[in-house]
Structures are given as C-alpha cells and as structure tokens.
C-alpha cells in the first residue's frame, strides 16, 4: 500500500461525502454513522486484514468534514462488539445516549472503530443510535443504526479502494392516507 493508494482513497471518500452532503445537508443536529471494513478497502475479505493506516487516512477526511459542517460522527464496531458505536462524549450527552463498556481493538471492534476510539479525545461506546445518514464502506451492514425510513443516496464514487460503498439518508415517516398533506 503506497502513497498513491492512500491519496486515492482520500479523494474517493471526499467525493462520497460531497455527494451525500449535496442531497442531505448535515448540521450539528445530525449524526452520520460510518461502517468501514479496512480489509475490504484493501481488497481483502471483511475481517481478515484490518489496517490502522487506512483507518487513519479515512478518519482524517471524516473528521475534517464533520468539523466543517458541524455534524456528529458515529463509527460502527464489528460484530464482535455487537456493532456498538464509537462516539464523542459530547455527542452522547447531546443526544441522550447510554454508554456501554468496552474498548474496541483491531480484532474485536475493527481497525476503524479502534482508531476512532484512540483518536477522539473523549470517546465512548454506545449500543445503538438512530442516525440521520450513513456511509457503509465494505458492506458492514449499518442499517440497524439508521432512523426508520432510510433512503438510498447514490454517489459518483462507487468504491473506496476496493470496497463497495453504500449510502443512505433518512426522512420522517409519512403518515396518513389519501387526504394527508406532506408539504405546503
């Protein structure tokens, strides 16, 4: 894995984030859940070849965009930690979430969650959230952490490295019947 590869995944993630924010502007009232298999980014099977170096590069881009747009990040752990999420303590407080106890490490949590836990100054784990949008890098299955009505978002960028990328935004449920009005 060379500089060119790391540079390309940086620009690929930047494009993905730009495409998402174009259709779903996120602010300080929103959480973006990130599921990442760094193994898949490298072209390996999920859970087999986690990379802190890839996690570091992806985290830098995500953190920069989150700061620029003031949205909150949640990094999904792997199934060995029941897909708990790494967030900032301030995010936990802001959204009234309950902390759980565990420390993600590369082989129990995943390289991305492990790196996020060490990079965030006040990292905590929560068991679940209902995020406003999500980016799934490498088919990590983030759907359980999105609000109930998820809407696919398409990007010009279909992969980050070798990993398939799927995105979603959420919207409120439409209730009512034939007489319901949804916008004025």
Image (cartoon, rainbow, N blue to C red):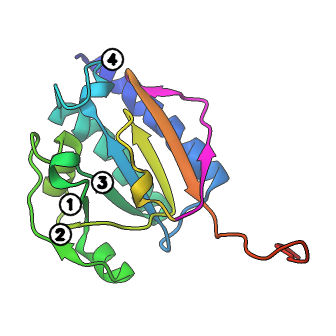
Q: Mark 4 sits on what residue?
A: 4
Residue 133 on image: x %, y %: 51, 57
User: What residue is drawn where x is 32% and y is 73%?
Assistant: 91
Residue 10 on image: x %, y %: 39, 32
* Residue neighbourhood size for the residue with mark 4, other residues' Cα within 10 Å, grouped as few (<14), some (14–19), many (≥20): few
Q: Mark 3 sits on what residue?
A: 75
Quadrant of the frame with the C terminus: bottom right
Q: Mark 1 sits on what residue?
A: 120
Identify the mark nearer the N-term, 4 or 1. Answer: 4
Q: In 3D space, how far apart are the residues under numbered discs 4 and 1 (Cα atoms)?
A: 27 Å
User: What residue is drawn where x is 34% and y is 83%?
Assistant: 96
Q: Does the segment drawn in magenta span residue 156?
A: yes
- The answer to whether 28 is drawn above or below residue 152 in the figure is below
* Residue neighbourhood size for the residue with mark 3, other residues' Cα within 10 Å, grouped as few (<14), some (14–19), many (≥20): many
Q: Nearer the viewer, mark 2 or mark 4?
A: 2
Q: In 3D space, how far apart are the residues under numbered discs 4 and 3 (Cα atoms)?
A: 25 Å
* Residue 97 left/right relative to 135: left
Identify the mark nearer the N-term, 3 or 1. Answer: 3
Whether tag 1 and tag 2 are in contact, CB under 8 A, the answer is yes
Q: Which residues are magenta?
A: 148-161
* Residue 47 left/right relative to 35: left
Identify the mark nearer the N-term, 3 or 2. Answer: 3
* Residue 166 left/right relative to 160: right
Q: Secondary structure at mark 3?
A: strand
* Residue neighbourhood size for the residue with mark 1, other residues' Cα within 10 Å, grouped as few (<14), some (14–19), many (≥20): some
Identify the mark nearer the N-term, 4 or 3. Answer: 4
Identify the mark nearer the N-term, 2 or 4. Answer: 4
Q: Does the segment drawn in magenta span residue 2?
A: no
Q: Mark 2 sits on what residue?
A: 122
């Amino acid at each position: 894995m060379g500089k060119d590869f790391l540079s390309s995944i940086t620009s690929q993630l930047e494009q993905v984030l730009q495409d998402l924010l174009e259709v779903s502007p996120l602010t300080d009232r929103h959480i973006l859940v990130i599921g990442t298999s760094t193994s898949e980014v490298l072209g390996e099977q999920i859970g087999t070849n986690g990379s802190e170096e890839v996690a570091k590069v992806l985290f830098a881009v995500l953190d920069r965009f989150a700061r620029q747009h003031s949205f909150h990040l949640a990094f999904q752990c792997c199934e060995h930690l029941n897909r708990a999420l790494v967030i900032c303590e301030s995010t936990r407080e802001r959204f009234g979430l309950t902390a759980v106890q565990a420390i993600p490490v590369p082989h129990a949590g995943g390289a991305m969650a492990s790196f996020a836990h060490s990079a965030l100054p006040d990292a905590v784990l929560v068991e679940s959230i209902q995020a406003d949008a999500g980016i799934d890098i490498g088919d990590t299955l983030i759907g359980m952490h999105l609000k109930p009505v998820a809407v696919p978002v398409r990007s010009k960028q279909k992969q980050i490295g070798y990993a398939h990328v799927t995105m979603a935004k959420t919207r409120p449920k439409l209730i009512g019947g034939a007489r319901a009005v949804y916008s004025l």
